[in-house]
Image (cartoon, rainbow, N blue to C red):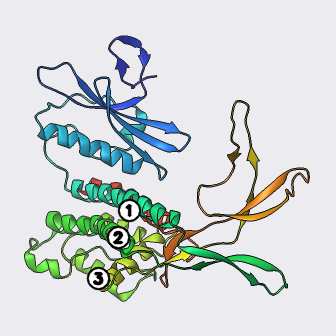
């Protein structure tokens, strides 16, 4: 496979790694980072020689893992490692995040590392949510619908702990910062007259879900009047929340503004029920459930609409969601944050050509 690193002990065997992080002076040990597509998502593995020193899993695409790999490389360089020629395949060439040919930091490296921190906050949040839901902070009930049938529902007996709100706030701040970093770096490079501390009072990345809103127009005109390139301003306009694919930025804007005054309000949510089947593969003693690993099992069984002979069980999804916000109430909080991470991550490369 052209472009892949090859094992020194067996040069004819391509490895699964995508880049060399560096090598230690006087020691024939190479640190390599690799992306692996697994059943549970995409996994980043960092190897020092033959030793696995780090493993991270992402179900939200490659971008957060690439940022973590680049951060690890920078840490190695600070610890005295020399830079190796990074042999990259065509995939990594399309997703270059930090310039490996220069010892100077790129102006947007800070923005990228903020996304790494946001991804770490998200992983921490998911662990805390799992702990909370595993304590069964709810009781099952029923409600009667208009058609006269009874349906299961969830009644909260213990509200989500404040630690969840605190982690959410940290994640949101880490996600808003990269956008403002972009605006500040554009000001530093292009402003005429030169950027000053007074500009901190107004320079930020504008966001609004309404086209041509006066607040966005005023800020964009301010950039234009200070000589920021028209193409950079076009990029700012292109990623506004009213444009398709960037709607989650409005969630970010509203949640960050609210977090300045109070912790985000969270609640336990559900969205109906779904059926699942259990199968016991050959060689297994226990059945395998064919459904996402969340929610609460109901003491009900029924026939599969696809095969009446197949018995199905039911589960009601139980999750933590934002309460009384612009984020849909039937969207689990970790999925909402993952959408925002993905959106902000994809914005940064759009501005790299201006530096």
**Residue 122: % across, % down:** 39, 60
Residue 172: give its label: 2
> Does 79 appear above or below 71?
above
Of marks 3 and 1, the one in the foreground? 3
Q: Residues within 10 Å of mark 3 (few under 14, many from 20)?
A: few
Tell me how far mark 3 sits from mark 1, CA to CA. 20 Å
Q: Nearer the viewer, residue 47 or 205?
A: 47
**Residue 284: % across, % down:** 68, 34
Q: Nearer the viewer, residue 267 or 75?
A: 267
Please tell me whether mark 1 sits on a helix, a strand or a loop. helix
When asked about the image quadrant of residue 119, the answer is bottom left
Please tell me whether mark 3 sits on a helix, a strand or a loop. loop
When asked about the image quadrant of residue 212, the answer is bottom left
> Does 29 appear above or below 98?
above
Which residue position holds label 1?
Answer: 344
Q: Nearer the viewer, residue 210 or 193?
A: 210
Q: Nearer the viewer, residue 210 or 319?
A: 319
**Residue 170: % across, % down:** 30, 69
Please report whichever mark, 1 or 2, sits nearer to the chain's N-terminal start: 2
The reply to whether residue 339 is in sight is no
């Amino acid at each position: 496979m052209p472009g892949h690193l090859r094992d020194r002990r067996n040069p004819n065997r391509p490895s699964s790694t995508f880049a060399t992080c560096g090598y230690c002076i006087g020691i024939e040990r190479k640190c390599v980072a690799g992306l692996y597509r697994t059943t549970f998502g995409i996994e980043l593995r960092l190897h020092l020689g033959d030793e696995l020193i780090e493993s991270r899993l992402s179900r939200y695409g490659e971008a957060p893992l690439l940022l973590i790999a680049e951060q690890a490389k920078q840490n190695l360089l600070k610890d005295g490692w020399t830079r190796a020629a990074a042999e990259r395949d065509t995939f990594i060439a399309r997703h270059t995040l930090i310039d490996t040919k220069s010892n100077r930091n790129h102006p947007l490296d800070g923005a990228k590392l903020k996304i790494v921190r946001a991804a770490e906050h998200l992983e921490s949040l998911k662990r805390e949510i799992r702990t909370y839901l595993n304590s069964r902070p709810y009781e099952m009930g029923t409600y009667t619908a208009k058609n006269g049938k009874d349906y299961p529902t969830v009644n909260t007996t213990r509200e989500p702990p404040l630690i969840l709100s605190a982690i959410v706030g940290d994640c949101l701040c880490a996600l808003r910062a990269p956008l403002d970093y972009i605006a500040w770096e554009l000001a530093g490079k292009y402003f005429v007259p030169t950027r000053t501390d007074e500009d901190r009072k107004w320079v930020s990345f504008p966001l609004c879900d309404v086209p041509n809103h006066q607040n966005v127009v005023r800020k964009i005109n301010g950039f234009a009047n200070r000589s920021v390139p028209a193409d950079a301003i076009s990029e700012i306009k292109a990623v506004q929340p009213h444009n398709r694919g960037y709607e989650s930025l409005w969630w970010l804007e509203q949640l960050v503004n609210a977090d300045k005054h109070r912790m985000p309000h969270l609640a336990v949510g559900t969205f109906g029920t779904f059926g699942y089947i259990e199968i016991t593969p050959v060689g297994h003693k226990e059945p395998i459930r064919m459904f996402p690993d969340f929610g609460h099992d109901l003491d009900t069984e029924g026939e599969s609409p696809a095969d009446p002979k197949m018995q199905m069980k039911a589960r009601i999804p139980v999750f933590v969601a934002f309460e009384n916000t612009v984020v849909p109430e039937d969207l689990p909080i970790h999925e909402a944050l993952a959408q925002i991470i993905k959106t902000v991550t994809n914005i940064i490369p759009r501005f790299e050509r201006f530096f």
